[in-house]
Image (cartoon, rainbow, N blue to C red):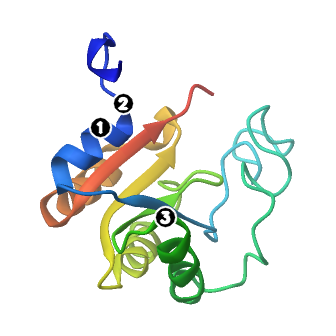
Amino acid sequence: MFDQMPYRTYSQEIRETFGHKVIKLTLSTPTTCPNRDGTIDKKGCHFCDRFGSKSFFPARAHQISDQIKETIPHLKERFNTDKFISYLQNYTNTYGPINFLREMYDRALDHESIVGLDIATRPDCLEDPILELLSEYENKTHLTLEIGVQ
């Protein structure tokens, strides 16, 4: 049935790329957004509640490396896989100083079971320095950008 669809699903692409099932590991990041920090507005937008698009996360102070260590065992058991893509979904994960973003991306990749990085962002937060940083990661790992429609 799926072979007859006029498009490829994300899971088909991932299975073909890696040769097996790979699951997204959603991480809470210490990021914000120009619609929250006063650059554009302070009210946020329609796509996120006050906690970002994934309000069930533990406290945002929880370190990325700790989230990975705590979550991987549960995902391994639930999905019967040992490979994961770190998924930075809440808020805008290309918004901030380059050194901050680099450190956050490096932490999200710092585990032997992590095979890629999926970054959610806004189109207005992809200026040249950010694109240059992302090109470094594209050369290191499987990189996906999810660009919202704000």
Spot occupied by residue 147 in the image (x, y as percentages of width and height)? 47, 35
> Would you name the residue on which mark 2 appears?
9
> What residue is drawn where x is 77% and y is 49%?
36
User: Tag 1, which secondary structure?
Assistant: helix
What kind of residue is marked 3? Phe
Residue sitting nearer the eye, 21 or 54: 21
N-terminal-most mark, 3 or 2: 2
> What residue is drawn where x is 73% and y is 54%?
54
> Would you name the residue on which mark 1 appears?
12
Seen as rendered, the residue at the extreme left is: 139
Is 106 located above or below residue 3 in the figure?
A: below
What kind of residue is marked 1? Gln
Circles 1 and 2: CB distance less than 8 Å?
yes
Q: Residues within 10 Å of mark 2 (few under 14, many from 20)?
A: few
N-terminal-most mark, 3 or 1: 1
Q: Residues within 10 Å of mark 3 (few under 14, many from 20)?
A: few
> Would you name the residue on which mark 3 appears?
79
Circles 3 and 2: CB distance less than 8 Å?
no
- Nearer the observer, disc 3 or disc 2? 3
Circles 3 and 1: CB distance less than 8 Å?
no
> What residue is drawn where x is 66% and y is 50%?
33
